[in-house]
Image: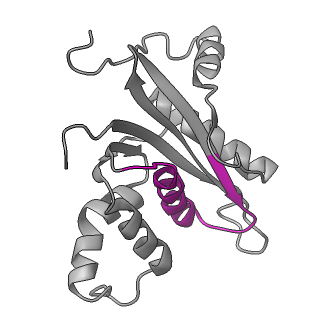
Amino acid sequence: MSSDAPIIHIHADESCLGNQNVDRERPGGAAGLIEHWAGGRWERRDYWICEPDTTNNRMALCSALEGLRHLKRRCRVLFVSDSQYLVKGMAEWVPAWKRRGWKRKGGGIENLALWKALDLAAAAHEIEWRWVRGHHGHAKNEYANHLAIGASRRQDDSAGLAASRFDAWLAAERERGRYIDYYEFLPPGEG
């Protein structure tokens, strides 16, 4: 990869309402915050999508697919998610499944079409898949969760990239006494 490829951070999360209930529809959402450093500041965009009846795992894969879909050229991507299913899948499982002809040792692969689509989308970039513990104060993960829950409840989508509301969300959270110690990390050489 060339060194002039932009560095993009994607913080993504998923939601599935009524996940424990198998007798009714389980609306879900997938969302993310895309950011990159430009002109001495972070430029941010949000995205979110929904499905009327889904699973957390399916939405985790959709959160990554949707985020990568918005990158118009080859990028170096730091992809942050609290989904071990997604992060372990892309970092460990997919390479092994591909070597075995898209088969698992223990049988079929759940969400196979989504895994294949994500593998294809990821191949266009250099991606570091990073897991963070969900609901443990990681502001950008919590923001992505906020977007995903909203999409689940409203059953709507952003129709592409939307102006990010992260700063307003963070200010409102700080008024409630949350994320007081949060500060922006600057890229190397910028601070």
Q: Position of residue 30 (x, y in %)?
A: 60, 52
Please state, as top left, top right, bottom left or bottom right, where the C terminus lies in the image: top left
Taking the image as shown, residue 39 lies to the left or right of residue 96, namely right
Q: Name which residue lies at 64% across and 26% down.
A: 165
Left or right, 110 with reference to 46: left
Left or right side of 143 for 52: right
Residue 77 x/y as whole percent: 33, 44
Height in image: 48 above or below 93?
above
Asked whether residue 50 is drawn in magenta, I would say yes
Residue at 22% over, 77% down = 96
Task: Work out whether 152 lies above or below 166.
Answer: below
Q: How many numbered marks have been drawn onto this rendered protein structure?
A: 0
- Displayed quadrant of residue 186: top left
Find residue 177 and report its horizontal and vertical position in percent: 58, 11
Report whether 5 appears left or right of 55.
Answer: left
Q: Position of residue 97 (x, y in %)?
A: 28, 80
User: In terms of depth relative to the viewer, which is nearer, 123 or 86?
Assistant: 123
Q: How is the image coloured?
A: one colour
Q: Residue at x 72, y 50 (%)?
A: 157
Residue 90 occupies which quadrant of the picture?
bottom left
Residue lying at 41% horizontally and 30% vertically, measured from the top left: 36
Query: From which residue to which does the magenta span run?
Result: 48-73
Asked which quadrant contains residue 45, the reply is top right
Q: Quick one: 126 or 170, which is closer to the camera?
A: 126
Whether 34 is among the magenta residues is no
